[in-house]
Image (spheres, helix red, strand yellow):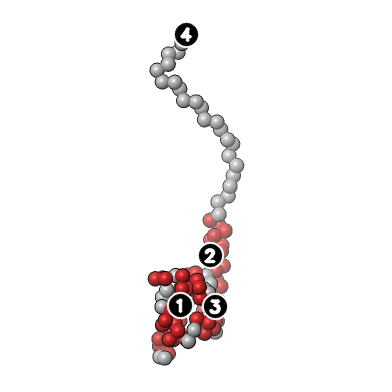
Amino acid sequence: MSRNNKTLATKALGSLFIKKGKILASAEYTALGSEQPVVGSSLRKLFGSYAKMVNHLQKDESLVALIAQSAAIQKEAVEKAKPILKSKPVTKAKPAPKLGASIAEK
């Protein structure tokens, strides 16, 4: 296969994995459906199998570092986004006034 096609596939897959914060397992990748930057059959043509593609990506140390950095940033964002629950005093609702009732009922 052409080295250029492998390079293009590596860049596309690398950007996806950076966005996700990890290298996805084969089942997770196929579950993406139309979000896949490179279709599974093309992966098999270019790399031979999904496992070989993962090995190829893990050889690129800068890509692995970027994925780890992205995962750390996403983890921080999730922790900051968690709402802090404060207990509020429970107040009872006031009963609705009776419509049409006069002040002095006998």
First of labels 2, 3 by sequence position: 3
* Amino acid type, callout 2: Gln
Q: Is residue 39 above or below residue 46?
A: above
Between 47 and 71, the one lying in front of the other is 47
How many dots with numbers?
4
Q: Nearer the viewer, mark 1 or mark 4?
A: 4
Rendered residue at 56%/62% (across/down): 76
Q: Is residue 51 above or below residue 30?
A: below
Rendered residue at 45%/77% (across/down): 13
Q: Nearer the viewer, mark 4 or mark 3?
A: 4
- Spatial separation of the CA atoms under disc 1 and disc 2: 18 Å
* Amino acid type, callout 4: Lys
First of labels 4, 3 by sequence position: 3
* Amino acid type, callout 1: Leu
Q: Is residue 76 above or below residue 46?
A: above
Where is mark 4, residue-wise?
Answer: 106
- Spatial separation of the CA atoms under disc 2 and disc 3: 15 Å
Where is mark 2, residue-wise?
Answer: 74
- Spatial separation of the CA atoms under disc 1 and disc 4: 82 Å
Say whether marks 2 and 3 touch (CB < 8 Å).
no
- Spatial separation of the CA atoms under disc 1 and disc 3: 12 Å
Q: Nearer the viewer, mark 1 or mark 2?
A: 1
Say whether marks 4 and 3 touch (CB < 8 Å).
no
* Secondary structure of the residue carrying numbered label 2: helix
The disc placed on residue 64 is 3
Q: Position of residue 86 (x, y in %)?
A: 59, 44
Q: Position of residue 93 (x, y in %)?
A: 52, 30
